[in-house]
Image (cartoon, grey):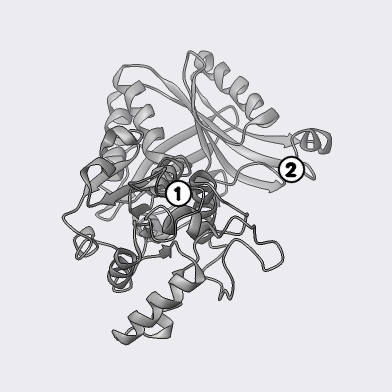
Amino acid sequence: MDNPKAFYRCLVDHLDAGTPVVVASVLSRSGSAPREAGAAMLVAPDGNISGTIGGGTLEAQVIQRARSLFNTRCAVCETFALTNRQASEEGMLCGGRVEVLIDFVEAHRVHARLYRAILAELDAGGKAVVVTSIRKAPDRIQTGVGWISKQGLHSETLDLSGTDAVFLESQFAADAPVLKREGALGYFIRPIHTADTVYIVGGGHVGTALAPLCARTGFRPVVLDDRAEFTDPARFSPAVETLRIGSYADCIRPLGIDETTYIVIVTRGHLHDQTVLAQALGTDAKYIGMIGSRKKRDAIYAALRAEGFSQSDLERVFCPIGVKIGAHTPAEIAVSIVAEMISVRTGYREKPEIRSTHAHFSAANKPARGSEREAAGESMGGQNPGGWADPKTFPQA
């Protein structure tokens, strides 16, 4: 689920308004089906949707089936097949199959209360695990729903005849959806995580380009800067939070960094970057990235070693930051940074590469107009003029 808070807020808004909806959830997939188990889509009576189960032909079929449920007011569980030809037309190598639960959600108080509680848990930064019981009768599908919080199971309308609260509560630690089948009765257990927080330390050109892209890719961006004009909410979309700090000297400690947090260091100068990095290394942050050239990185690392930081500490840092795409502009650099964070979030990549050259350029193809740090950071701060963002053009990066 790409944006669970937006999804459940939309669901609650409809139910509070007395409007029933249909929720389609991918239970399982095989082959090159476009979305994984757990993907969900809400279909309103007027045809508007929230969320996605992959788009294309498959999603169109599910929407058509979902709209028919406003007449029958029931649930169905169906398998949709994507042929090789359809897959080819949609850019995939081969076809696949997805099993989808398409559930009519009546707008009554039990459902409204349940989903409002889930949304409140997510808004508070917590985790919820939504459990749907699915009983296949000869002529119909019967569903029930409950959820698990850190306090335990809230059974609500769940059919518990095929399991028990102890087993379900043990699933609170699950990171991926589970489909448990017991004969004609099944349980779809879907963990709902809030977006991981990204603290973007520095609200200059790169930070401004990075923050909205983080929001669009499922992160919660918070921009920190010690200058009022660079944390002005008017510079950012409503999905971006801003925080003006007194100084960079103690900006990380009050944030409550944990193992789900991402830190991106893109301040206006080397000394600020070093100050923030030293603080970041004292946290359990999942990702620490710092913009900069190899020369700048090595100088900061030498200074931090002198302060007592170990090589293993420094090997946590993604610097130079971002994947290698030949980026130059702030927007391009932002894309490379987000791509790197996504690779960490998905588990595709756990540790920084040990890089002997700049992150984005090999010795053979390094552009003549300078490194990205020269373009995106050093020259912006006036420390290495002559890049695309010459300080005469951008005097307050």
Residue 79, position as x, y percentages in the image: 67, 36
Horizontal and vertical percent position of residue 14: 36, 21
SS at circle 2: strand
Residue pictured at 54% horizontal, 33% vertical: 52
For mark 1, what is the residue? 390
Residue at position x 41%, y 77% from top?
A: 299
Taking depth in this image into account, of 51 and 297 the one nearest to the observer is 297
Counting from the top left corner in percent of width and height, residue 39 is at 53, 41
Q: Which mark is residue 58?
A: none
Q: Earlier in the sequence, mark 1 or mark 2?
A: 2
Asked whether, in this view, residue 194 is left or right of residue 88, the answer is left
Give the label, 1 or 2, closer to the camera: 1
User: Up-down: is 55 above or below 33?
Assistant: above
Q: Is residue 169 above or below residue 306?
A: above
Q: Residue at x 56, y 23 (%)?
A: 66
**Who is closer to the viewer here, 170 or 23?**
23
Q: Residues within 10 Å of mark 1 (few under 14, many from 20)?
A: many
Residue most extreme to the left: 246
Q: Taking 112 as reference, is 279 above or below it?
A: below
Residue 309 spot, x, y in % from top left: 34, 83
Say if residue 345 shows up in the picture: no
Element class at badge 1: loop
* Circle 2 Cα neighbour tier, 10 Å, few/some/many (<14 / 14–19 / ≥20): some
CB atoms at circles 1 and 2 under 8 Å apart?
no
Q: How many marks?
A: 2
Decide: is 382 above or below 239. Answer: below
Can the viewer see residue 256?
Answer: yes
Which label number is shown at residue 96? 2
Q: CA distance from mark 1 to mark 2?
A: 51 Å
Residue type at mark 2 is Gly
